[in-house]
Image: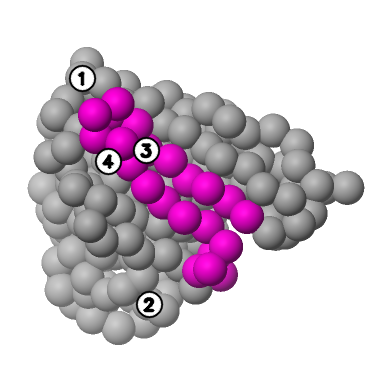
Amino acid sequence: EVQLVESGGGLVQPGRSMKLSCAASGFTFNNYDMAWVCQAPKKGLEWVATISYDGSSTYYRDSVKGRFTISRDNAKSTLYLQMDSLRSEDTATYYCARHNYGSYLYWGQGVMVTVSS
Amino acid sequence: DTVLTQSPALAVSPGERVTISCRASESVSTLMHWYQQKPGQQPTLLIYLASNLESGVPARFSGSGSGTDFTLTIDPVEADDTATYYCQQSWNDPPTFGGGTKLELK
């Protein structure tokens, strides 16, 4: 059974940093591109970042470029999102997701990040 | 960015047929996907590449379209289908989602 389990969320002050993790199991992690997708409270879904299966390529939405870093440790089957210089508008539930033909087939349960003083 | 436009909400009775539309601001070929999200849960993939039913998804769900106009059809609708439905394109960068259509049962 495929499982994606996020951790690392919580309350953080504006301008500070936070690192999210996503532990994957039930599939060969290093065969798949992975992504982070977020959802602000009572809002829709937004793609945040994608990393290729081997970590060699990364892609970001414009609003997080230079502030967020997606990475992976294939030996640990874990995906990460380092979030720096956090802003109130980054407040959202963050989901890790596995790519599938451009769609997102498997999703974690999500982790809430609240940026507030 | 490619903007995907969905109707905000629909209300239908159980047993009826419902179509949920998604219009793209530019062509996305057939790289359109559909998700269902119930309150407090993560999204689940229903349809990928416009018309392919994801494994385990009931055959009541179907997708069609290409270019800029796409449709998710549920026939017949069941009470458990109460949810928000999102379209998502992966043809143009960055990948984008529609605003979601909230489906309510009468």
Is residue B100 or residue B31 the one in the foreground? B31
Q: Are both tags, 2 and 4, on one chain?
A: no
Residue A77 lies in the magenta-colored region: yes
Label whose residue precedes the other's in the sequence (1 or 3): 1
Q: Say what amino acid the circle numbered 4 marks.
A: Arg
Residue farthest along the right direction in this orientation: A117
Mark 2: secondary structure: loop
User: Where does residue A45 sit, x and y in percent of width and height?
Assistant: 49, 53
**Residue at 53% of width from left, 48% of height from top?**
A82
- Measured Cα–Cα span from mark 1 to mark 3: 14 Å
Q: Residue at x 63, y 55 (%)?
A: A84
Task: State the CA–CA distance, disc 3 to disc 2.
Answer: 27 Å
The circle on residue A77 is: none
Q: Give the residue drawn at x 25%, y 61%.
A: A57
Residue A104 is at least partly visible in this image? no
Q: Secondary structure at mark 3?
A: strand
Percent across and percent down for residue A95 are 46, 40
Neighbourhood count class around disc 2 (C-alpha, 10 Å): few under 14, some 14–19, many 20 upward: many
Query: On the same chain: label 3 and label 2?
Result: no
Specify the amino acid type for callout 3: Leu
Residue located beneath label 1 in the image: A26
Q: Amino acid at mark 2?
A: Thr
Specify the quadrant that holds the N terminus of chain A: top left
Residue placed furthest toward the top: A1
Residue A47, by quadrant, is bottom left
State how far apart marks 4 and 3 are (Cα).
10 Å
The residue at which mark 3 appears reads as A79
- Element under disc 4: strand
**Looking at the rendered structure, which numbered label has been put on residue B2?**
2
Residue highlighted by disc 4: A98
**Magenta-tinted stretch:** A63-84
Q: Mark 3, chain letter? A: A
